[in-house]
Amino acid sequence: MKQYDLRSDTITKPTLEMRKVMASAEVGDDVYREDPTTTKLEALAAELTGKEKALFVSSGCMGNLISLYLQGGRSNEVLTASNSHIIQHEIGSISAIAGVLPITIDVPRGVLSAADLAGKVKSGSYDMATTTLIEVENTIGGYCYPLENLEGIKDFAQTHQLKIHMDGARVFNAQAATGIPVKTYAKYADSITFCLSKGLGCPVGSMLCGTEDFINKALTLRKMLGGGMRQTGILAAAGLYALSHHVERLKDDHAHAAAIADALAKAGWAEVDREGVQTNIIFFQVPGLSAQNVVRRLAEHGILANNEGEMVRLVTNLDLNDEDTQEVCSLISSLDIED
């Protein structure tokens, strides 16, 4: 039985062409800042985000952690959505390592607005943590942040002298879905991360982008966290290839997700958040069945999924082509998952 792995877009394998550029990459010691391919990737990331400088880090979690540590500051507060990645999937590092106190806000789809932040900023009292940072995630659950929300949050932050960090793990998906350039999204944040190892199909790595002063400090903190690597050009070459060849094709993943969401909606047994399928992520549930049971039953028919709480999550990716998508849709149409 063929398996269709829709657990995440992190499961993709480097393409043959990507492997070739990795094998031939010019390298040096990046701890000495002598890896030319990594330097080239960092320059490109800074250009794409409109920031002064960028830094290659091992993961989006590391990039987020560095920003929380430097811009949040120990014993200070960060305002963020309660379902954000830094809260749900980064093992408490926000407090355990960065020393920042998260103030979480329950908002639909995890999309904050200035109104959601009103009244939550603290400062000037010796017995309270000071609010220093706002964190937003774009996309969040595959949903794109509306520009008007980001504009309002930016104005709010300036009024209260707060920094903004954007976890842009899948921000290129947002660009592909909306036509809004990554650089436009990034201008509403003081720092931004984006992942190379998700929809862009690289084996490892993320980029952290911000001011020159911020990235210089981030370089030191990256080393402190054990993230100083040597001949990173082999990995950076994959990133350069992905940013040149895999950005436009993200639209294919979005089309595949839309087709699968439609098949689920028509199947009769699934309740699908169809409106939320803006990019490559689908959430649904089956009334009367736990998400874990649904994941198990789908796996029995060759569809690998994940669950987040009581929602089942499917993520389309580089390794799922048009034919695979048609097969997944056919399987869904033929299943009665409730039996």
Image: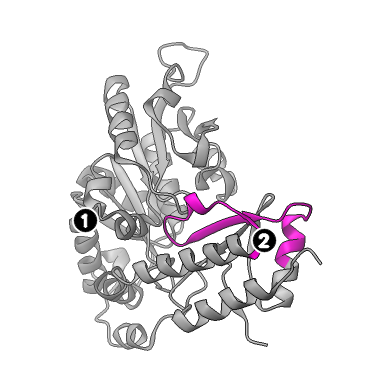
What secondary structure is found at the residue carrying circle 2?
A: loop
Q: Are marks 1 and 2 in contact (CB under 8 Å)?
A: no
Residue pointed to by mark 2: 268
Q: How is the image coloured?
A: one colour
What secondary structure is found at the residue carrying circle 1?
A: helix
Query: Is residue 141 visible to the viewer in this orientation of the structure?
Result: no
Q: Nearer the viewer, mark 1 or mark 2?
A: 2
Q: Which mark is residue 161?
A: none
Considering depth in this image, is 124 or 309 the residue closer to the camera?
309
Q: Tell whether 175 sits left or right of 227.
A: left
In the image, is residue 279 part of the stretch drawn in magenta?
Answer: yes
- Residue furthest toward the top? 125
Give the image location of residue 226, x and y in percent: 46, 58
Give the image location of residue 36, x and y in percent: 21, 72
Residue pointed to by mark 1: 46
Q: Specify start and end residues of the magenta stretch as a single range.
A: 267-295
The residue at the point 58 percent across, 44 percent down is 92
